[in-house]
Amino acid sequence: RPGQDAESELIARRVRVLGPSYRLFYRQPLEIVRGHGTRLWDAEGREYLDVYNNVASVGHTHPHVVEAIARQAAVLTTHTRYLDRGIVAYAERLLALLPDPIDRAVFTCSGSEANDLAVRVARAATGQRGVIVTEEAYHGNTALVTGMSPSLGVGVGPEVVTVPAPDPMAAPHRSFAAGVRAGIERLAAQGLRPAALLLDSILSSDGVHPALDLAEAVAAVRAAGGVVIADEVQPGFGRTGSAMWGFARHDVVPEIVTLGKPMGNGMPIAAVLAQAAVLEPFSAGEPYFNTFGGTQVSIAAADAVLDVLEREGLQAHAAAVGRELRALLDELAVVHRSIADVRGDGLFIGLQLREDDGSPGTALAADVINLLRQRGVLTSVCGAHGDTLKLRPPLPFSRADAARLADELDGVLGDLEA
Ligand code: PMP
């Protein structure tokens, strides 16, 4: 294959200087050099349909966001210890998109920092220590939240318990709330009470589960004196179509909300949003400063993202195209025995695969994403068994993009089932 030697050399140099914790996607890794909208291009000029990246949520290199970043970078970027109108105006604009009780914003650079801070805030507010997360959750990479990210496979930290996510295939009648109540009891057995339920309400790394008895689980946490931290790093900013925020799909108002990935369309900006009374015990005890959190360039990007979401009606678009994509995938499920389940909301869809004997389609899913990659369609997997395709494209994903994805998937599954 042309270019193979250069590719192998780059991989070898990468391993030498970056080491083994830097993982690569695909058996034949990709060198992506350019992106626009829902498209990415590799070093040889080949075009790919992006069905995976939620960071470039309003589309790769969206001109309005690029222009806002470039314009502000040419004027000023510094930290938050000077008066600045932009950060105040953006915080007001963002908070107006949340339920009324949530009225404070703290800016960070990553979802990990936001969750780390949120847990410290919850512990200060409640005077309690326990944290409840789902069994395959990922909440970030700091020392504290690595211990709340069991999907990393290194166990959970002290004062943390895990509860099962819904699983419509293996346990169709499982109650999430009952699991949370059992988690509270396991904390009590260690002499602990819950500070927080830390939850991504679309359960992205648990395999994408849109249905959840969240209100009942939240009531149990509050009855035990804890608060709810809604990790909106994945479902937030309109992706699920039916609501701007994942928690809003369940009629729940959390005490704390964390934002990340799509917030700046690629600029490192994230946030903790909270009710002032919840934030106060932490803020009174210690100052919080984050050098790069909420710089003028990041804020300009985040503000431009909200412009695009509004002007292009991307939440409604995600709902409409997501519905059509689900219908196409449901049709495929009728003809392909390896499709076990299709579920999701808006442009966040999980497509679960099974082997012929009914066991989780782990190896099958790995084959599917690699064959799709060969056909110019990029996605990946999630869930405890890695048997669920995570379909989570940039929001401008079109009807034609959805049809293309369904066609290629049809072809790949047909080849593998033959
Ligand atoms: N929470 C969730 C639900 C995430 O998916 C991620 C990132 N995959 C994080 C937190 C951490 O965000 P970051 O990588 O920006 O630190």
Image (spheres, helix red, strand yellow):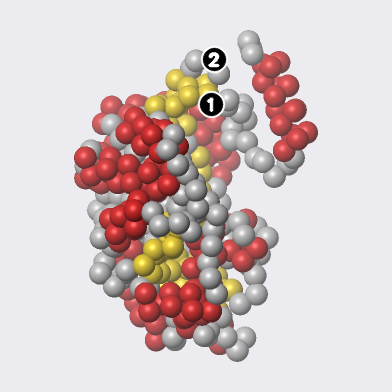
- Frontmost residue, 19 versus 337: 19
* 412, above or below 163, in the image: above
Residue 325 located left or right of residue 36: left
Residue at x 30% of width, y 50% of height: 238
* 403, above or below 120, in the image: above
- Frontmost residue, 328 versus 3: 3
Q: Position of residue 308 (x, y in %)?
A: 28, 40
**Amino acid type shown at disc 2:** Glu
- Looking at the rendered structure, the number of numbered marks drawn on it comes to 2
Where is residue 172, by image quadrant? bottom left
Tag 1, which secondary structure? strand
Tag 2, which secondary structure? loop
Residue at x 50% of width, y 53% of height: 79
Q: Position of residue 163 (x, y in %)?
A: 51, 70
Residue at x 46% of width, y 49% of height: 295
Residue at x 36% of width, y 37% of height: 68
Residue 323 has which mark? none
- Frontmost residue, 116 versus 414: 116
* 105, above or below 393, in the image: below
Structural crowding at the residue carrying mark 1, measured as other residues with C-alpha within 10 Å and reported as few (<14), some (14–19) or many (≥20): some
Of the 4 image quadrants, the one containing the N terminus is: top right
Which residue was labeled with disc 1? 32
**Amino acid type shown at disc 1:** Ile
Can residue 129 be seen? yes
Spatial distance from mark 2 to mark 1, Cα to Cα?
Answer: 9 Å
Residue found at the very far top of the displayed protein: 2
Which residue was labeled with disc 2? 44
